[in-house]
């Protein structure tokens, strides 16, 4: 049932405070559009009303959860020249979730096993991307072969901060003894980076067709820095332990970034804040970036993906070993999800947001687990600005966390497992003072990131 908590608890994406730097030279007034969505699920039951509530053994005596998330992204487009446009993206996400469950392992008398879990977080990011006409190379599809005109990136800059914090408590009857585990975890990071291409990097054809596949690659130069990591603390049967790993790093100075894209077909998006609801038909574009430590979210918000990788390497480096047993292993961990995204594209406005519903369609297979979908779509800019202000407000609680749902879920799960094993190993040793490693520059409650300076206009 823990899976049922971890998966829906880590949800969604998107803005940060608008940069004050003027865009120059601008040939007209900036144009804005917005995209966002939310989800919520509240449930509680007792006794026979619960899933498996009438079983003779393993009877669920109580179950409850409360899950909420909101995501918003605001696009601002300004014409720089006849061949260059600057896009500013502000994106933010907020999430909170709590879960509790009690199960009777026997019926006479009832001996309850209890589990509770809570998590909260938010992410704030901002970025500039200069685009210009370019090309991509088709590899398959109805328009193959060819090198059609495409939206291409000259350069970009980004700044983001995120974290996830939470607690898990477990009581497990083991005969006459009840084993107790209480854990707190906090993980997050921040990054600031700039990237420029020697020639414009094509991202998506200006007029794609369903089934088209394409690729493009260009050498880049970059600069930037990041810090990310985690802190764990807790106790098992009264024995305390803690661990911390926060690591800074620099963004790769150069390389070749490759993008592969696929047009997966058309979708109709609904703006449900208007009456009647406005609709827009878009192409669902799946983009994968490789060859460099950069990815693009919400279409064109370029940032370094190493800020997430450091969390995994830290967890791997701090793997504790139980007495007489192997170290806690996390085989197969990867951040493939961080370098790929399904985005919505329409001729005219260009990218209008990202599709994340598929990542939340089924939270878990456990009885009673919620099935969630983030219903996102276009919305009025005024609505998005209000939503963003709520996410950015310190009263929103929690820290922050990325739209990278799969990565976030895996990180949270590994954090819990690593801490449990750490505590289990230490609980079998003679009691002693707990070890603590203070995090350098912890980001458990990050402030909204300072907007990056716009990339130099017209510069590669």
Image: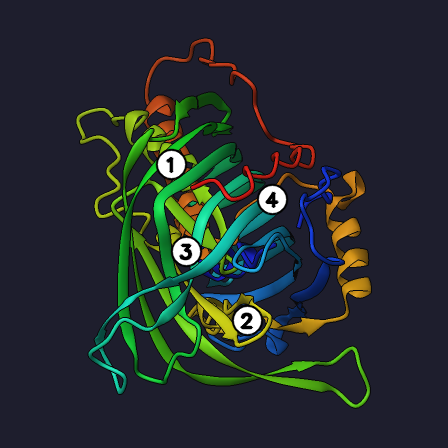
Seen in the picture, residue 273 relative to 157 is either above or below; the reply is: below
Residue matched to label 4:
125
Disc 1 packing (10 Å; few <14; some 14–19; many ≥20): many
Nearer the observer: mark 3 or 1; the answer is 1
Q: Nearer the viewer, mark 3 or mark 4?
A: 4
> 10 Å neighbourhood of mark 4: few (<14), some, or many (≥20)?
many
In three-dimensional space, the C-alpha distance between marks 3 and 2, rounded to whole angstroms, equals: 17 Å
Q: Provide residue 304's location: percent of width, then percent of height.
A: 42, 39
Q: Which of the image's four quarters has the C terminus?
A: top left
Image quadrant of residue 121? top right
Q: Nearer the viewer, residue 357 or 28?
A: 28
Which one is earlier in the sequence, the residue at label 1 or at label 4? 4
Q: In the image, which is nearer the foreground, mark 2 or mark 1?
A: 1
Residue bearing the label numbered 1: 306
The alpha-carbon separation of the residues under discs 3 and 4 comes to 19 Å
* Of callouts 3 and 4, the N-terminal one: 4
Which residue shows up at 37% across the image and 70% down it? 149
Residue name at image x 23 percent, y 24 percent: 323
The image quarter in which residue 35 lies: bottom right
Q: Residue at x 52, y 50 (%)?
A: 130
Q: Secondary structure at mark 1?
A: helix
In the image, 92: left or right of 130? Answer: right
- Identify the residue shown where x is 60% and y is 47%: 119
Picture layout, residue 119 above or below residue 342 = above
Residue at the spot of label 2: 370
Number of residues whose C-alpha sits closer than 10 Å to that of mark 2, classed few (under 14), some (14–19) or many (20 or more): many
Q: Which mark is residue 48?
A: none
Asked if residue 162 shows in the view, the reply is: no
């Amino acid at each position: 049932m823990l899976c049922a908590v971890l998966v829906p608890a880590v949800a969604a994406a998107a803005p940060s405070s608008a940069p004050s730097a003027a865009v120059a030279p601008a040939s007209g007034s900036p144009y804005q559009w917005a995209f966002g969505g939310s989800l919520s699920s509240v449930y509680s039951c007792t006794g026979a009303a619960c899933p498996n509530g009438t079983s003779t053994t393993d009877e669920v005596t109580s179950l409850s959860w409360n899950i909420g998330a909101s995501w918003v992204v605001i696009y601002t487009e300004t014409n720089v020249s006849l061949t260059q446009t600057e896009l500013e993206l502000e994106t933010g996400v907020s999430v909170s979730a709590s879960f509790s469950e009690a199960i009777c392992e026997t019926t006479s008398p009832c001996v309850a096993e209890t589990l509770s879990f809570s998590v909260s977080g938010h992410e704030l990011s901002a970025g500039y991307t200069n685009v210009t006409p370019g090309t991509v190379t088709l590899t398959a599809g109805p328009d193959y072969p060819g090198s059609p005109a495409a939206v291409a990136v000259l350069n970009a800059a980004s700044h983001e901060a995120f974290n996830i914090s939470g607690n898990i408590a477990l009581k497990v009857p083991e005969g006459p003894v009840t084993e107790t585990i209480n854990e707190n975890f906090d993980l997050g990071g921040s990054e600031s980076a700039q990237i420029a291409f020697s020639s414009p990097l094509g991202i998506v054809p200006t007029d794609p067709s369903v089934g088209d596949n394409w690729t493009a690659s260009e050498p880049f130069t970059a600069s930037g820095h990041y810090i990310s990591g985690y802190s764990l603390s807790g106790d098992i049967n009264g024995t305390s332990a803690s661990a911390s790993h926060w690591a800074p790093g620099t963004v790769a100075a150069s390389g070749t970034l490759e993008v592969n894209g696929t047009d997966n077909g058309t979708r109709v998006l609904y703006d449900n804040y208007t009456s009647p609801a406005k609709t827009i038909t878009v192409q669902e574009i799946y983009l994968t970036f490789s060859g460099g430590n950069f990815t693009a979210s919400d279409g064109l918000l370029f940032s370094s993906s190493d800020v997430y990788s450091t969390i995994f390497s830290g967890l791997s480096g701090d793997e504790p070993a139980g007495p007489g047993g192997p170290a806690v292993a996390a085989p197969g961990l990867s951040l493939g999800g961080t370098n790929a995204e399904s985005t919505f594209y329409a001729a005219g406005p260009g990218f209008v947001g990202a599709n994340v519903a598929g990542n939340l369609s089924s939270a878990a297979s456990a009885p009673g687990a919620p099935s969630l979908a983030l219903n996102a779509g276009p919305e009025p800019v005024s609505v998005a600005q209000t939503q963003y202000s709520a996410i950015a407000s310190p009263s929103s609680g929690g820290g922050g966390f990325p739209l990278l749902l799969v990565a976030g879920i895996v990180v949270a799960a590994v954090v819990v497992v690593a801490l449990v094993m750490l505590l289990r190993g230490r609980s079998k040793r003679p009691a002693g003072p707990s070890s603590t490693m203070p995090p350098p520059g912890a980001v458990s409650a990050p402030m909204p990131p300072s907007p990056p300076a716009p990339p130099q206009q017209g510069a590669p």
